[in-house]
Amino acid sequence: NRTVYLKDYQPTDFIIETVDLVFDLGETMTTVGSEIRMRRRPGADPSAPLVFDGDGLALSGLALDGKPLLPERYDSDADTLTVRDLPEDGAFTLTVKTRINPTANSQLLGLYRTNGIYSTQCEAEGFRRITYFYDRPDVLAVYTVTIIADEKTCPLLLSNGNMVEEQTLDDGRHMARWHDPFPKPSYLFALVAGDLAMIEDRFTTMSGRDVTLRVYVEHGKAERAGYAMDALKRAMKWDEERFGREYDLDIFMIVAVSDFNMGAMENKGLNIFNDRLILADPETATDDDYARIEAVVAHEYFHNWTGNRITCRDWFQLSLKEGLTVYREHEFSADQRSRPVVRVDEVKFLRAHQFPEDGGPLAHPVRPTEYVEIDNFYTTTVYEKGSEVSRMIATLLGPDGFRQGLDLFFERHDGGAVTIEDYLKCFEEATGHDLTHFALWYHQAGTPVISVASAYDEDKRELTLTLGQTTTPTPGEKVKKPLHIPLRVGLIGPNGDNMEPSAITGGEHRKDVLELTEDEQTFVFEGIGARPAISVNRDFSAPVKIRFDQSREDRLRIAGAETDLVARWDTINALALETLVKAAGDVKAGRSVTIDGELGDVLIATAEDDALEPAFRALALTLPSELDIGRAIVDNVDPDAIHTARSAVFAAIAQAGGDSFARLTTAMENPRTFSPDAESAGRRALTNAALALAVAGEGDPARANRAYGHADNMTDMLAAMRILAHQFAGSAEAEDALSDFRRRFAGEPLVLDKWFSTLATVPGAQTLERVAALMGDDAFDETNPNRVRALIGAFASSNPTGFNRDDGAGYNFFADFILTSDKRNATLTARLMTAMRSFEALEPTRQALARRQIERIAAHDDLSRNLRDIVDRMLK
Ligand code: HT7
Ligand code: ZN
């Protein structure tokens, strides 16, 4: 297996100016003509051959300046095209012809045809499955694309940029030509052809330019595209107001397809989306779906500047576009919705996905230095931790400093393919801050642990805070250095008020943000009249773990009075987690589970506090999941003990707050007509969190059954069905609701995904048999990534008791699936496989059974590069 190293980066020997592509689309045979105008790079070796990338290609024609090339001038195989004796200087045109089969392309990378639609996915290295090219992000060219296809089956012919010509041809065929004036790398190329419905709108940019907006979806689904269109217009406006970024083409198109490996793709002017991130109406989409659609539509749109106008020099710089764009997306969501609730969701996601990645065998820095398969580096570390790193820059420089740095970045690098160093330099030059030490966040893997110790001196009116930092070793990186960490700290007085120190000494700080730079530092807060409760890492200012042996009294004060709602939630959550971890220990040791009344009191008081927004109250009422508890236990994890413990704690809280929870299930008024706005969604979230507890307290599914029957939107219906299926598994009520749902949504694959996932995550050993049987369901299609993720992905990654059966049958089943799936779709399969990355945290018996199955997979010598890379790193 090849390994690619950052240190080996070299610019290409040739520069490409323009690319003219002609696609003659056929279901099993598409011909691709590529006319490339290029020249040798000044200073490059005058005898160097041209070496283009390919992947599974066959060359069907090659010419230089219109003349066929003699065989001795070139070599070609499936993966490479090498051309020798090219002009030393001056431009020339190379014509390359290939033939490809889009119907046989089950990898969904390159050009593929499913459900009658031709579409492309070129990031990261899919363009080389279409034609031989310099398939790398630092080769930017101007593209003109001609598409020829049957007019009846493909009335729609789309590519990047603006349409410049359309013509009807003989034999029922037609053609369209598109020209994209913005130089771009091949990974941003896109083509879509087929028969789709469309909605259209317009947007006037800040400088008064009129832009046509179109969203294409399957016929019959156009009414479900309205929310995505609305989100797009809000994103366009927001990017102008917040970052001064204006859209640059005359048209912006989104196409929703049902077979897609990831969420969406930011191709220039022609974003292609997984349809689950576009289609929404109240009957089929939940509030979470609406929020995700808004976020991803914005994310892909924001890439137009962060990713497309300025792109990455090489794939090691992936976080330059992804981390920054996630940060922009997060800020957009915070402005559209409730800032603290959005932030809490981000923190939960980071802890559930990125922290385990950073603490396991697949840990890597935000900017890796080597990879075997780049597809495997579209990770939560590159995306979400990368976003946190940009957020920390904003915290250290302040909002104005961050904006000045970003303005300089856009001005200086527009049209370029750049590095993370180039990005950081802009902030340094715009603000005068030195980010040399801070840059280590990009290069060092692992989650720092901050230890906090405090001492209060009443006579001196001083609070002393001693902060230490350590990062545990990660694969290939034994010694860790201290990072530059911005830690926002709040002091809460005895009456619950915020206390303002007269001065802070002992180290750099920006208002309430302490700048940690060493292994250990002591900060002194002066002018503190009473011993405060200390709230550390407000707003989750740094992606770190906090170790603070704080008194229960102080934590209860924070849980009840902290004005920073992120820190308040964090403390409530930590109190719950502590109880749950202790309960799991009790179960494991054969003791009975006891819970102190205080936790119930805090949760009930928060849920009932009308001064707080319902969405926040719902968050407080949602106990940490079994997976959260397992992660907090760290090692020797027994999923069955965790399940028993969590159920007991849940039941005890449900008993304690029975009346409150029952009342809350009807207390939240929602307007008669459904609205997906964040406030209404928050009310639904609180109602449904209370419903889960109310029925647990009652020990009777009746209330959930009624809720299922009355539900007039997917959020409420799914919540009720999940409660029945998970808390009353096997009951007649649960089975009735599940079969009603299956019947009602028989023609709605995206809704059936929710049904598959609900069933796949029913706790307990018996779920494996059901999952295996569901693979035979008419609606299950193993070639569709959404279906596979909904059933197999949900089972492996979100059903700790079912998947980790103590006889190892879950692992065995999963390994069998992985081995067949790998042949079909390597990108998807390798991502599924990461569900087992934390197997070493399991108790010894399960750990051995899991390892055996991973080793069984690894023993196959015909694995895809994607899967080979993941299993090898997991077993290292
Ligand atoms: N930039 C896009 C990444 C992506 C992708 C990567 C590998 C294989 C398939 C893929 N589909 C989309 C998505 C984004 O982050 O915006
Ligand atoms: Zn992205």
Image (tube, rainbow, N blue to C red):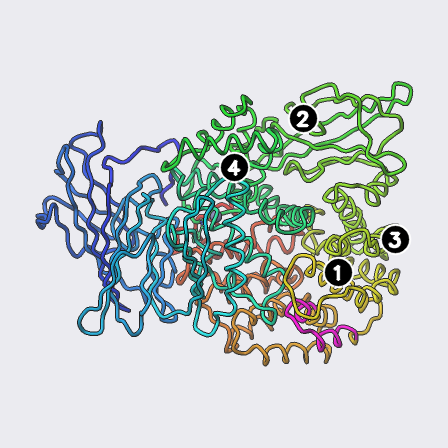
Circles 4 and 1: CB atoms closer than 8 Å: no
Mark positioned earlier in the residue sequence (3 or 2):
2
Q: Amino acid at mark 1?
A: Leu
Disc number at residue 686?
1
Q: Residues within 10 Å of mark 1 (few under 14, many from 20)?
A: many
Camera-near label (3 vs 2) is 2
Mark positioned earlier in the residue sequence (4 or 1):
4
From the viewer's perspective, is residue 666 above or below residue 593? Answer: below
Question: Is 743 placed left or right of 635 in the picture?
Answer: left
Residue where numbered disc 3 is placed: 601
Q: Tell me the distance, in whole angstroms, between the alpha carbons under discs 2 and 4.
A: 27 Å
Mark positioned earlier in the residue sequence (1 or 3):
3
Q: Position of residue 45 (x, y in %)?
A: 20, 29
Circles 2 and 1: CB atoms closer than 8 Å: no
Q: Position of residue 841 (x, y in %)?
A: 64, 48
Q: Secondary structure at mark 4?
A: loop
Q: Tell me the distance, in whole angstroms, between the alpha carbons under discs 1 and 3.
A: 17 Å
Residue where numbered disc 4 is placed: 365
The residue drawn where x is 41% and y is 52% is: 210
